[in-house]
Every structure is written in C-alpha cells, then in structure tokens.
Image: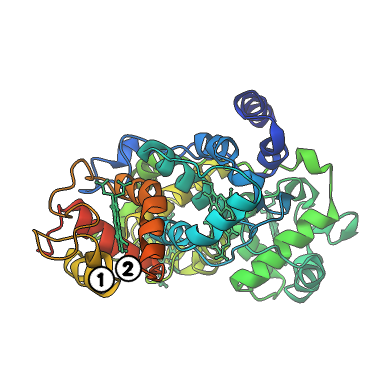
Amino acid sequence: MPPQNFCLRQMRRQIDVEKIRTLMLLILAVSFSLSGLGQAFAQPLFSPTQDPIVGSRIFGAKGCSKCHAIGGVGAKLAPDLGRVSTPRSFYDLAAAMWNHLPQMSKQMQKIRISRPQLSPGETGDLIAFLYTLNYFDRPGDPKAGRGIFDKKHCVACHQIGGTGGVIGPSLDKLTQQGSPIFVAAAMWNHGPAMAEAMRERGIGRPNFSSVELEDLVAYLKSANPGREAERIYLLPGRPDEGQELFVKRRCQECHSIKGRGGKVGGDLAERRVQLGLVQFAAAMWNKAPAMLKKMKERSIPVPQLRAEEMASIVAYLYAVQYFARPGDSRRGENLAKTKGCISCHPIGGKGGNVGPDFRKVEGLDQPATVVSAMWNHASTMEEKMLERSLEWPLLKGGEMADLVTFIQLGGRGR
Ligand code: HEC
Ligand code: HEC
Ligand code: HEC
Ligand code: HEC
C-alpha cells in the first residue's frame, strides 16, 4: 500500500536511527496535531501542537531508551513503557514520571548519565508519544482467538489460511494489518450485509467483549504472520480530521461530545472509563444494531468509513478524552498543603521559603509547562528533601491534574 510505505520511509528518515528505528516499525505513527482542537476547548493541554513522532525522537535523544524498552524492544533497566496495560491520561503519565524520579536518578548515577532537562514542548511531545502507546492494547491470545472464531461461527462463512466457509470473503487480507482498527472498519462497513447473511442462515449475531476481540485480532495476525518488519501498527489518525468526520458523517446528530450534539446515542467523551482502541472496536460492533435502527428511523445513511477515517475518529475521541479530566484548583491547593509542597513553597507569603512562592511563579500557564518545570526542578527539590529527610511526595494522576491546575492559575485555589 503506497501511503503506508511512504509514511514508513518518511519515518525512517526522520527518526533517530539507534534503537528507535526498530521501535518505530512497531509503533504507530499518529500525526496527532491538536491545533484544530484548540478552538473547540477552552483549555488546550498543548499549544500549538504536540507530535508523538517528535516525541519518539525525544525519547531516544533524552536517553529514556537507555533504560526503558517499548513493547519488548530496547533496554531492560526499567519498566517496559509499552506494556503498562491500564489506559493513561496526560496526567497519569505526568504523575508516573514524577513518582519514579528518585528511582530514576539512582539508576542514572549508576550508569553515569545526567538527568535530561525537558522544555515544555518536549514534555508535550514526549507525553503524546507515551500516550499513543496506549494504542497497543493487551497482546491478545491467538489460541483463544481461534476458539472464538469457531464459537462465534465466523468459521462457518469465512476462511483463514485456507480453512472455513466461503459465504463471506476470506479474511487473510485483513490479517496483514496489525491494528484492530482495520478489523473494526471492515466489520462496521460490512456489518449490515453480514447480519443479513447470518439471519438467512439462522446464525445469531454475536457480541464481543473487548478481550474476545483482542484475541480474535491476535488470531487473525498469527494466521498470516508475514514479516515482522511489514507489520506496521500504523494509525494515521488525526484528531482534527476526526472532528470534521464526526460532523460530516453525522455522528454528531446522535452523539454529543461534552454536551454538544445529539442525545440519541449518548455522549462519547463523558465516560468514566477511558476508551481503548479495542473497546471502541467492540462497541462499534456490539452497538451497530441499535445504531442502524436509529439511523433508519432518521433516514441517516449508514456511513461507510475507511480505516484511516475510523482511525481519525478514534484519535479525535482520544483527544477529547484527553481533555476530559481537568484538575480542580481548590483540591490542588489542599494537596499543596497535604503533600508537603508548602513546607518549601509559600502561597502568598505563607509557608516555607526554600522554593519560589506559587503566587509568584511566572509563565507556568500550560499544563505541559508546569509539568516540565516540576521535572526540571526536581533535582534541586530532591536535594532539599534529602537535607530535610522528607519523603518524595507520590502523586496519583488526578492529584497531578489538581496541583497543575492550581499552579497554572497562579497559586490560587479559587
Ligand atoms: C537511568 C534509567 C532511566 C532513564 C534514563 C529513564 N528512566 Fe523512566 N524509569 C526508570 C526506573 C528505574 C523506573 C521505575 C521506577 C520505580 O519503580 O519507581 C522508571 C519509571 C518510569 C515511568 C513509570 C512507568 C510506570 O510504571 O508507569 C515512566 C512514565 C518513565 N519512567 C518515563 C521516562 C521518560 C519519559 C524518560 C526520559 C525522559 C525516562 N523515563 C528515563 C529508569 C529510567
Ligand atoms: C452467515 C455468514 C457470516 C458469518 C457467520 C460471519 N460473516 Fe463476516 N461476512 C459475511 C459476508 C457475506 C461478508 C461480506 C459482506 C459484504 O459484502 O458487505 C462478511 C464480511 C466480513 C468482514 C469484512 C471483510 C473484508 O474483506 O473487508 C469481516 C472483517 C468479517 N466479515 C468478520 C467476521 C467475523 C469476525 C465473524 C464472526 C464473529 C463473521 N464475520 C461472521 C458473512 C458472515
Ligand atoms: C442515528 C443515530 C446514530 C448515529 C448517526 C450514530 N450513532 Fe453511534 N450510537 C447510537 C446508538 C443508539 C448507540 C447505542 C447506545 C447504547 O446502547 O448505549 C450508539 C453507540 C455508539 C458507540 C458505543 C458507545 C458505548 O459507549 O458503548 C460508539 C463508539 C458510537 N456509537 C460511535 C458512533 C460514530 C463514530 C458514529 C458516526 C460514524 C455514530 N456512532 C453515529 C446512535 C447513533
Ligand atoms: C524540599 C523543598 C521542596 C518541596 C517539598 C517542594 N519543592 Fe518545588 N521547588 C523547590 C525548589 C528549591 C525549587 C526551585 C528549584 C530550582 O530553582 O531549580 C522548586 C521549584 C518548583 C517549581 C518550579 C517553579 C518555577 O518557578 O519554575 C514547581 C512548579 C514546583 N517546585 C512544584 C512543587 C510541587 C507541586 C511540590 C509538592 C508536590 C513541590 N514543588 C515540593 C523545593 C521544593
């Protein structure tokens, strides 16, 4: 496929060769420009753009890859950052980086590398890169997937590697794509015809849990392994395009995003649980009958979606999820007290006098700026803490969001 090859070549050229190269063959390239979203949301996390491809380069250039592997590729001195299975937001990652700082400093002294400084832009790109790793869902179990292929009667109509029915097309072609997004798009587009074929033969339309779908995708992949280098987890999704598609393909007539849009299908941003890629694919399949029914009622034609378009919609939904959990500055102020920040930092003159007054810090008006400031000052903070035998304050993702918001608002708990 020419566009993919083109992308791949371009990526190769762009990316710091070292370890990152092998890595990039595995890693999806999401051109994750959020510029178009800035206007839609009052408080963009990054301005003007954040770019995971640049982030991957920073990951190499700043020496993160000297300790961390991604999905099994790379050094083994620290946790594999591609294998953390829970969904993560910007703040979860920022908190993880903060929490591991003391351990990391120790490792760095051991292998004699200096602690990298990160600019706000670099912090944004780096976190975008780590964030997109989320697209790697739990590696599925191909054996279990084979069982599901039988149990859900797919095998009655589809061939994989030469065995199975011939009522539907062979799925070998799909197996070459590593990403569940291709499967999701294909199943969405063919869903109505498939349901019809199932009805004719008295086969019930199966539902999938996301674990089942993961296993099924793993089976599809293993049935046609191909060469590892050709298996690109390419997700050329762009949130700004996704946002446009969401309107153009009329999703918005039934779904709202943060309260804006239709009410028929529910809000797709206000979920308590973050959407993973496979969960999304499973939901699109499982909810298709309900959606198709409503579309018919409203004479909305069933939109056909190319895989790239599906990827952009996913990227868009990711992006709105990204913005979904803003911090609370009042809670942030309380945390500054309970986490011991004020033993060094005064707030409006009250508190310690070791670090700068939170009311007087300047230029920390973006989350990425605050996070990079915390990261860059951490060595000094750590030293001062050691002097005082204070323990490094650990933060949860939500707490990081609250603290950052508090600092961003000039140390005001509002
Ligand atoms: C010298 C080795 C070293 C380097 C370099 C390093 N780290 Fe780490 N990192 C560690 C160790 C060790 C841990 C685990 C610490 C712990 O268990 O408390 C860790 C943990 C993490 C975690 C938390 C993982 C989790 O469990 O969720 C993140 C995120 C992270 N590092 C990001 C980075 C980034 C980004 C860079 C580059 C700027 C980087 N690290 C550079 C050693 C390193
Ligand atoms: C009763 C027969 C039948 C069953 C059972 C069935 N399918 Fe299909 N499937 C079809 C038909 C027919 C098509 C082609 C529809 C069209 O032309 O739009 C299709 C198309 C597809 C496609 C799109 C293929 C492509 O080349 O784009 C995918 C993916 C797919 N099916 C997956 C599955 C999975 C996974 C299962 C098991 C849950 C399943 N199917 C069960 C009949 C079936
Ligand atoms: C005619 C109305 C309608 C349109 C148009 C529509 N949907 Fe839906 N959608 C629904 C309904 C109804 C549900 C089922 C809600 C439920 O059962 O919770 C649903 C469910 C979903 C779900 C699962 C949500 C969840 O949390 O389980 C996703 C994802 C989704 N739609 C995405 C889309 C996308 C993307 C588009 C545009 C390509 C779209 N929908 C267009 C009506 C619609
Ligand atoms: C042991 C003392 C100490 C503690 C506790 C401490 N800090 Fe600091 N902090 C400092 C010092 C000292 C600096 C200035 C470091 C420098 O200039 O390199 C600093 C700098 C900062 C900066 C950068 C300010 C700027 O002007 O760029 C931020 C943001 C910050 N700290 C946040 C926090 C938060 C949030 C906490 C609580 C989780 C905290 N600090 C706890 C000592 C501390």
x then y, percent, for residue 36: 32, 37
Q: Is residue 300 visible?
A: no
Q: How is the image coloured?
A: rainbow
Quarter occupied by residue 343 = bottom left
x then y, percent, for residue 72: 73, 54
The residue that appears at 35% across and 59% down in the rendered structure is 384
Circle 2 crowding by C-alpha within 10 Å: few under 14, some 14–19, many from 20: many
Distance of label 1 from label 2 (alpha carbons): 7 Å
The residue that appears at 72% across and 71% down in the rendered structure is 201
Q: Nearer the viewer, residue 240 or 286?
A: 240
Quarter occupied by residue 103 = bottom right
If the image is split into quadrants, where does the N terminus sit? top right
If the image is split into quadrants, where does the C terminus sit? bottom left
Q: Is residue 91 visible?
A: yes
Mark 2 — residue?
Answer: 399
Q: Name the N-terminal-most of marks 1 and 2.
A: 1
x then y, percent, for residue 64: 58, 46
Which label is found at residue 388?
Answer: none
Mark 1 — residue?
Answer: 335
Give the side of residue 76 with respect to residue 339, left or right.
right
Q: Nearer the viewer, residue 229 or 81?
A: 81
Identified by mark 2, the residue type is: Glu
Identified by mark 1, the residue type is: Leu
Q: Nearer the viewer, residue 303 or 301?
A: 303
Which quadrant does ligand 3 occupy? bottom left
State whether label 1 is within 8 Å of ligand 4: yes
